Image (spheres, coloured by chain):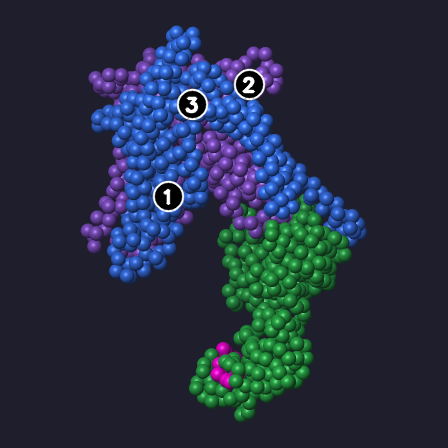
Amino acid sequence: MERRRRINMVLFLGPAVLIVGLFFVLPVLVDIAISFTDLGRDLRVTEITTDNYERALGFGDVRPDRQLPGVIARTVIYVGCTLLIFNTTFGLLLALATTSLPSGSGAFFRAVWLLPRMSPSVVYGILWIWSVHGGDTSLVNQIMMGVFGYEKPIDLRQLYPMVVIIIANGFIGASFAMIILTSAIRGIPEHLYHAARCDGAGSFALIRHITLPQLRWPLTYILIWQTLSLMVSFEYILLITGGGPFRATTVYAIFIFQRAFSASGQYAYGAALTFFLILPGIVLALFLWRVSNMRKLMQQPRIEVH
Amino acid sequence: MADVASLAAAAQGQEHWDRLAARSARERRMRRGFLYVFLILASLPVMVPYFWLGTLAFSAHLSGVDTRVLWPSIFILVPSVLLTWLWAIAARTPRQALIGWAVIWVVAIAIFAVVVGPSLHLGNFRFLYNPNFNAENENIVAAEDNPGFSATSFPWVWTAFANSLIIAGGATLIVIIVASLAGYYISRFQYRFRTTSLAAMLILHAFPATVLLIPIFILMWQLGLLNTLFAIVLVIVGIELPFAVFIMKGFFDAVPWEIEMSALTDGATRRQAFFKVVLPQVVNGMIAVSVFVFIRGWEEFVFVLVLSTQQAKWTMSLYTFFVVEENSLGVDYGLVSAVAVFYILPSFVLYTLAQKYLLQMTVSGVKG
Amino acid sequence: MASIEFRHIQKSFGAVDVIHDMNLTIDDGEFVALLGPSGCGKSTSLFMLAGIYLPSGGDLLFDGHRVNEVEARDRNVGIVFQSYALYPHLSVRENIRFPLRLKKVPAAEAERRIAEAAELVQIAELMERRPSALSGGQQQRVALARALVKDPTLLLLDEPLSNLDATLRLTMRTEIKSLQERLGVTTVLVTHDQIEATTMADRIICMRDGRIEQIGSSDDLYLRPKSLFVASFIGSPPINLIEGQVENGRLTLGECTLSAGNAPIGEVTAGIRPEHLTIGEEGLPGRIVQIEPMGREILYVVDTGIGQLRVLEPGSTATHRSGEQVSIGFAEDNTLVFDNVNGERIADARFSL
């Protein structure tokens, strides 16, 4: 009996534990280990050192990394704006609007907004480049020059690089929120709306008093999860602006990527910078677990044999 | 208690009610109009670029961007869609509606064929059957007064296609097996770290794996797996597994216990009950998770970029990326669009076909 | 308070017609029940009264004024749903306050009215709880308070008792009835349970497939059903129905021929309620095949020449045994005859032994 219990555990849970260990636990440990070395482009460790942390934060006569304050400020602006404008507010508006329409029209607009999600990042990136680049053939310039009579083409990637990457990431985030919130809105019992309408509620009162209170948990979930993804994701930035121009869109994650993989090969320094990202990552993920409803997740097993 | 509303109503009679009804009708109309205007305006920035991509793939020629097709197509398409929609409101019977739509679209297609038709061609898809398309590009572009231009030699697209297929398929297979086993165990068995393991899955699914790019790169280098497809398969499995376990657990939770109990009373062990009785109940979940992981594997870009440098190990994402790099200044929009359309198509088809299953997944994912 | 009138009301959802030409007048202060099996259109009618659904045709009148297109929020109706539909994120007090808040009733008056409503349904001590912390019966009372606090023109009850257990249902039935009598508010109850309808309502509207089948008191529906449907829908244990033919004033049922006074010739269904049959010395010979004690009555199932009959006898212990040969008698006055062609009762047709 006891033996079978143990075999079952290894059989069912073993592979998952192994993979999770190999890809989450081990890399975190490896990262910490590397951050205390001088691992560089030649992939060789010659000494154990705290240089990387000193270089980032500044100790004694070592000045802190000059670029870091700017990078962190840009990260805060980028994450904050994308999150508040698109991943929550705009996603919520899309979900509310499409669920208020007859189901056919609603589904059409939701399908349109799924396009960015369905596209591989490379394709999405090239679409953005084609839309906003500085030549007179970009979509924006065709419209600006053709419809609004601009004399010269404008280059949005030069003028407002941060706005471009916020909107580019925001479209993806908005569609994510839209999907989740749409199914959450659909899950609200219809009789609540009926009751509220009989109690005298108009369209706005329905949203304010019935829909929004019911969306509290999905919105919290989206907020935390998207904060995490935005903090570390740099795929679209890499593809659309490459962090430029003049580091204008170099947020923390792409900064690490550039230290480690673009030419310089400063793996150890990158690992130290990564460590500062792992910490808030773990904290936020733990917070997500706290706000989720534990009791609802775990039902007691009703079969005792193994 | 004096009833104010009904006293007022009695005093003013019919006019009072008519005023209320008119106000409601007005508000309904305004709300509907406002919603459509908002959604159409908000969706244009998404619709137009994708539409452009589609037109380019079938119309652009080498050396130059082509918008001769984009705007005429939009000028034909937009009125047709509007008319279709208006007719849907105006038509009295389904039969009338169908006839009207047929007329609108026959006319639209006819105009399209005359105005845009001559510009359409399939030449941009030559990369599908001509492995040396880029060298030919080089000759043409160099001949057109671009002496500095030298083309990279690309692997054949089908190599990249096969690599992507192997990665996405391999990762899907491993994830679905491992996640089904673990999801079932967490959902149905009593053991000491049950809550902890579920918590771990929830936390890890939220924890972004891209942050671990550097240590994973070092690990793969240490294991001698750089430049192998296997490394990428492993990474995708690792990233997607917690989420997959979490979703599968949700699906297992929904299977009635009585089914399993009766299997046990019929003499099955729990392992047999799992394979023969429970697993067939969660096929929907397995489809959803498979599609999800497959698309993720199909799209993966950053890890492939970091972990493989040999052309023979390129995936569709790298292939597209380098085609874009090469042509980002507008050398061959048509080719880039065609590659992009070719690359996007499998995701698109899978997403559309599996929409029903994916929605179930999102629901349990959030409510979970 | 208001009187209500349905005038040729129709309702369809897409191509599906749910209500066909409904005509009904409800007097000010009356308590009526819409009774029928599920899918008969009774809830749709209720939702049209509430303004949640708008009629597709005809006129809906409140106090003689047409209100077809007036939406729910302007109608001032109180409604209690089967699921109670309490707002889960609001406390009991906030739930009851909700309609007053939307009407912008001044705070002091709102407090007074909330207290009054809470007093009325006896939930004063639950005011700060969340709906999820209440039992079914308590939720029911909160829903009632929320419906009553706005002094509704019309009170609508949609299967309000079906989620309660049997004892509670009995209490709430009486309470709602007496509450309605005290307040004098026009009330419409939707139910599929005939006991609920007969005990609470002044008048019962029996519906079937989107049409009104019969309107009347519980006596009318029970003793003088207008159709086969009403006869078989009302009554528990159900009425005995036997198909047969009438010829030359004789009614042939199975192997027996009975006299059928003035029934016209044709295919008919004969009906008689179980409690109108008696086991005695004379009448139809038969054999008892099953005995079901029901508390104050005993139900005998008897095989006779005209088919199986259910016979209800008073008393709590069976006086006959299974397998016993008995004779079954009945009075002509209690018999019903229905025309098989249109399902309607032939008004003065009777049959006897």
Q: Which chain is green?
A: C
In terms of secondary structure, what is the magenta stretch mainly? Answer: strand
Q: Which chain is blue?
A: B
Q: Position of residue B106 (x, y in %)?
A: 57, 35
Image quarter in which the C terminus of chain C is found = bottom right
- What residue sits right under mark 3 in the picture? B124
Q: Are marks 1 and 3 in contact (CB under 8 Å)?
A: no
Left or right: where does residue B53 sit relative to residue B214?
Answer: right
Q: Is residue A217 visible?
A: yes
Callout 1: 10 Å neighbours few (<14), some, many (20+)?
A: some
Residue C295 within the magenta-colored segment of the rendering: yes
Q: Which chain is purple?
A: A
Name above or below for residue A216 compared with residue B53. Answer: below
User: Given the current orientation, which residue lies at the most extreme bottom position?
Assistant: C281
Task: For marks 1 and 2, give the one nearer the viewer.
Answer: 2
Q: Position of residue C197 (x, y in %)?
A: 61, 67
Task: Give the number of marks.
Answer: 3
Task: For marks 1 and 3, give the one nearer the viewer.
Answer: 3
Q: Nearer the viewer, residue C193 or B32?
A: B32
Q: Position of residue C234 (x, y in %)?
A: 59, 71
Name above or below for residue B139 compared with residue A202. Answer: above
Work out how far the residue at label 1 is from the one at label 2, CA to CA, in angstroms.
43 Å
Q: Are marks 1 and 2 in contact (CB under 8 Å)?
A: no
Task: Name the subunit of mark 2.
Answer: A
Work out how far the residue at label 2 is from the one at label 3, CA to CA, in angstroms.
23 Å
Task: For marks 2 and 3, give the one nearer the viewer.
Answer: 3
Q: Which region is colored magenta?
A: C293-306
Task: Name the subunit of mark 3.
Answer: B
Residue C287 within the magenta-colored segment of the rendering: no
Q: Which mark is residue B287?
A: 1
User: At numbered mark 3, what does the secondary structure look like: helix, strand or loop?
Assistant: helix
Which of the two discs, 1 and 3, labels the residue nearer the N terminus?
A: 3
